[in-house]
Amino acid sequence: MPSFDIVSELNWHEVTNAVDQSNREVITRYDFKGVDASFTIKDKQAVVLEAKAEMQLNQMMDILSQKLVNRGIDLKTLERGPIVEGNLRATQEIKLKEGVDQAEAKKIVKIIKDSKIKVQAQIQGEQLRVTGKKRDELQQVMQLLRGADLELPVQFNNFRD
């Protein structure tokens, strides 16, 4: 029986490249002259922005967003944390969501069932397995999910005939 997996994964190599490019741009930009501002990756789960003021953090977020989009990372994976100000510094943690959580998985299963396409969807941890009798039905599900308004980007892996 043909099947495929629905996952939400990040290419951490591209995230690292985007953070490095953002750091280089902050160093060379005129409006950041003399300002100690930086981006750092924390435990492969988040990017920490650090600057002197909240306004600069907002500008840094724009830079990071632009670099991530250029590298093919969907901005739906970003979850902005609160801005913490203290000791003449402002920091913000941007979490990067990876994997399909239970609530989103149930929403995807409901979308698939409501479409009346003859396939079965099973939640397996942080991914979903979709099986059907025909390859065309699975491709219809892929098209349906690409057009659906989901809170996270999804990729399709392990397509088997």
Image (cartoon, grey):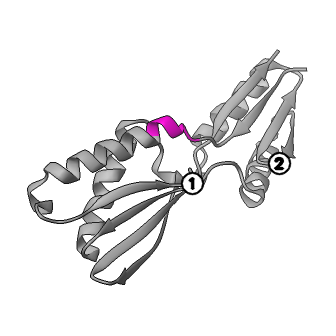
Q: x, y percentage for residue 125?
A: 82, 48
Q: Are there few (<14), some (14-19), or many (20+) residues within 10 Å of tag 2?
A: few
Q: Relative to residue 91, is residue 97 drawn left or right? A: right
Residue 150 magenta:
no
Q: Amino acid at mark 2?
A: Gly
Q: Residue at x 84, y 20 (%)?
A: 134
The quarter of the picture where residue 30 lies is bottom left
Q: Amino acid at mark 1?
A: Asp
Name the magenta segment's main secondary structure.
helix
| Helix, strand or loop at mark 2 | loop
Label annotation for residue 11: none
The quarter of the picture where residue 36 lies is bottom left
Label annotation for residue 125: 2
Q: x, y percentage for residue 85?
A: 35, 82
Q: Residue at x 15, y 61 (%)?
A: 32
Q: Residue furthest bottom?
A: 86
Q: Are there few (<14), some (14-19), or many (20+) residues within 10 Å of tag 1?
A: few
Label annotation for residue 43: 1
In this rendering, the count of numbered labels is: 2
Vertical order, 127 against 97 (above or below)? above
Range of residues picked out in magenta: 10-14
Q: x, y percentage for residue 28?
A: 14, 49
Q: Give me the C-alpha separation between circle 1 and circle 2.
A: 22 Å
